[in-house]
Image (cartoon, helix red, strand yellow):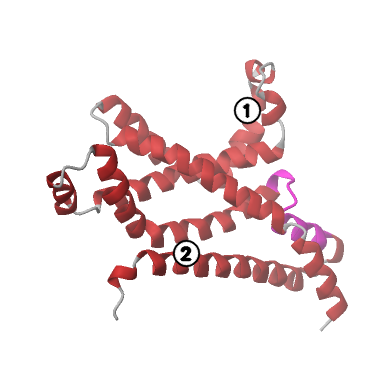
Amino acid sequence: MDVPFLTDTFLALVSGVPLTIQLTVLSLAAGALLAAGLVAMQLSRFPLLALIAKTYVFVFRGSPLLVQIYLIYFGLGQFPALRASLLWPFLREPYWCALLALALNEAAYSSEIMRGALRSVPSGHIEAGKACGMSSFLLLRRIVVPTALRNSLPACANEMIVMVKATALVSTITLLDITGIAAQIVSDTYRSIEVFLMAGAIYLAINFAITNAVSFVEYKLNHHLREA
């Protein structure tokens, strides 16, 4: 075992962790905001809005994320109007293209999680809140949102882990995240097994932390369901 090489590799890969975490957090946050809008559109009384939202979800869930990244990074530059717009200084940068692709993809999955969580709230709880004289806002804040949040935590944890792994695809558009640095080291040393095993261990450590953090939150939120 080449301990010095593994140590140097680990330190090099760790330098890509901030970018991986940053892309994960920002894409999850932006995706959640977009997902809330999609859920509102799907649950609205206007069939056209619901159709637009369902089409969006179908397209982004049904096509590979790597294709979406390529379409945004390589494809948007083919439009002269876009190159002449104020958005081009951002969209010509791989970082913003990657973040946009991840957020748009995440919104499609998160919207389905949110929609399912909202529909899982027992109608009896809502009727009880109305019987107590709660306003729509208070009913949403005290009953619907907390119940939906508890119900969606396992799916949210799974989506966070998937997003951490999905950020590895940004290495294909020159971003030096964990996978990007690993590929660079392999191209210099041809020692793929050690390098990618080390990269995989770092991803496992990140996802282990996410799993335990969500489990702790779930434990706290479900205190009324725990046995004495």
Q: Is residue 12 left or right of residue 115?
A: right
Of pointers 1 and 2, the one earlier in the residue sequence: 1
Mark 2 falls on what kind of element? helix
Residue 15 seen by the camera: yes
Residue 108: percent from left, percent from top: 43, 43
Q: Residue at x 28, y 49 (%)?
A: 144
Nearest the viewer among 81 and 221 is: 221
Residue 180 falls within the magenta-colored stretch: yes
Residue 145 placement (x, y as % from top left): 33, 49
- Residue 66 shown left or right of residue 46 in the figure: right
Q: Which residue is mark 2?
A: 214
Q: How many numbered markers are drawn?
A: 2
Q: Pointers 1 and 2 in contact (CB under 8 A)?
A: no
| Near-viewer residue (125 or 188) | 125
What amino acid is found at the position of numbered circle 1 in the picture? Answer: Leu
Q: Residue at x 46, y 39 (%)?
A: 33
Task: Give the residue pinned by disc 1.
Answer: 76
Quarter placement of the N terminus: bottom right
Image disc number at residue 171: none
Q: Residues within 10 Å of mark 1 (few under 14, many from 20)?
A: some
Q: Is residue 85 above or below residue 66?
A: above
Q: CA distance from mark 1 to mark 2?
A: 37 Å
Q: Magenta part of the protein: which range?
A: 172-187
Q: Position of residue 26 (x, y in %)?
A: 59, 45
